[in-house]
Image: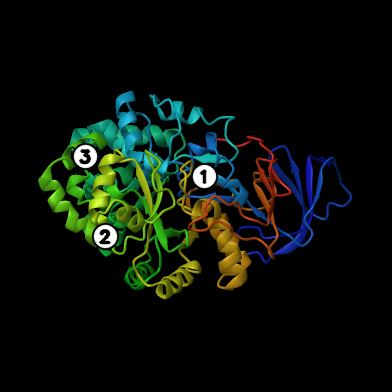
Amino acid sequence: MEFDTIITNGTIVDGTGKQEPYVADIGIQNDKIIDIGDLSHVDSSHSISADGQVVCPGFVDVHVHSEISLLGGRDQYAPLMQGITTHLAAPDGFGWAPLSPQRAQEFWHYTQFAYGDAQVALNWQTPDEYLSIFDGNIPANLYPQVPHCAVRLHAMGWDARPATSDELKLMEKTTREWLDAGACCLCLGLDYQPSANADLNELVYLSKVAISYDAIYAAHIRYQLIGRKAAWEETIEIAQQAEIPVHISHERVDAESVEVLERVDQEDIDLTFESYLYPAGMTHLAMLLPMEFQTGTPDDMLANLENSDVRIKSLPYLREKLGQGNQIVGYNKSGRYIGKLLSEAAESESKSYEEFAYDFIQDELAIETFMMPWVTPPEENEKVLNRTASHPRMMIASDGVYNIPHPHPRSYGCFVQYLGKFVRERKLVSMKEAIYKMSGFPAERFRLSDRGKIAKGLAADIVVFDPDTVADRSTWFDSVQPPIGVNWVFVNGVSVIENGNVTGELPGKVLRKGR
Ligand SMILES: [Zn+2]
């Protein structure tokens, strides 16, 4: 027998979270793992020594704004350098298919804060047409979710009201198109337009469609309109009414969520969540406006902001949300103040923080992105992060944003930070458990049957890293920094990272649930 590649003598951490690490060789042929064990007697044209290194399944990132950046640009390989081999599409329910070119353009404008200046065609009549742009053009795998924002826009535009029964039927039709195309999950961004306008009835209705395909429900929950605790509870309500497994995006274990998590345990609710484990989020300032002024297309919203009453009502609201003005500018249309604090930018224009923010949304035509530090004290943040890092329902996901001048450090560092800081330095999680939270757990949860584990016959998505040195290097003010210690990454049997260097190969596939 002969293999294309043999990875020899590595410590295999298999992604199941159950098997203890063990030393073995792995044989790869074409895109599959063919054998595991002592393969010293086997020929191979390509043998890689993994002495002293961990060999584990490629990581699965279930919440990441990478689908466009995987097609090209500065950050095309940034997630791979951390070992991420599969990306879920449509985070926060963002998507542009199937929409008319005009609606797609409107929604591109709305989502540009998370996708940068990329040029895309924006004319996809079906989910399959959209997914076809990735075939042969991406270095990692892309796994679709149903983008609720596009589903709702397609049925009823930007209307800020509950759907009629006819509109629900239209939404069901588009949801089914995505599920038929292999989507694994109904994904929502309930603080974003137009998803924020969906009522519980709509969410349950569409969840029942999703679960009929064994797809799950994942959401950026409704923090803004109903508050965090109620938003967790609404998610539980959906789990119960639609009998669907639910997943909550970018969360953490603190006093507020722990109460709900206790109830989840007691009532045995099928709920998971994900964390990136940094004490700051990233989004657009527009999200800090009162929700009633965020509705409509970006142009509608901008026209609304011209109204002096809207300004008067918004400023106190912004003042409260902006706190000390320690938000960091990540991106905006004109390229101003990149990497600076909002407080510095406001002072340079002799404006209050809230005046600056309001004007900035207008001047930048609502294309602006900020890192937003948590408002709690740093010592408390570290406690919360530590507590979150080992929670049994938690998996790692980056919420990375790419192709913008100054991304959040999680874009280049999330998965390796977990290995360096939380596993090696703080010893809060075993290597076996950590790898599970980055591979086997997300794969199982999102119905990815042939990945997320090291086993014979599964896809050869494999990471080789040095457990003694693996670490992130991206920081708040210098965030475009590749990690160290990730030496080899294989996607579908092809090496995309070799000895820590990008090869330029594009072996990624569109993965489809049930195929
Ligand atoms: Zn989100």
Q: Could you say whether the residue bearing mark 2 is in a helix, strand or loop?
A: helix
Q: Which residue is mark 2?
A: 321
x and y percent of residue 327 in the render? 36, 57
In the picture provided, is 74 more to the left or to the right than 273?
right
Q: Could you say whether the residue bearing mark 3 is in a helix, strand or loop?
A: helix
Q: In the depicted view, which residue is nearer to us: 416 or 513? A: 416
Residue 326 picture quarter: bottom left
Tell me if residue 290 comes above or below residue 74 in the rendering: below
Q: Amino acid at mark 1?
A: His
x and y percent of residue 47 in the render? 82, 46
Q: Which residue is mark 1?
A: 87
Q: Could you tell me which residue is drawn at 42 percent across and 30 percent down?
A: 127
* Mark 3 Cα-neighbour bin, 10 Å: few <14, some 14–19, many ≥20: some
Q: Could you tell me which residue is drawn at 52 percent across and 44 percent down?
A: 87
Would you say residue 515 is visible in this rendering?
Answer: no
Pair 1/2: label in front: 2
Q: Amino acid at mark 2?
A: Lys
How far apart are the two marked residues, 1 and 2, measured between alpha carbons? Answer: 32 Å
* Mark 2 Cα-neighbour bin, 10 Å: few <14, some 14–19, many ≥20: some
Pointer 3 or 2: first along the chain: 3
Q: Amino acid at mark 3?
A: Met
How far apart are the two marked residues, 3 and 1, measured between alpha carbons? Answer: 31 Å
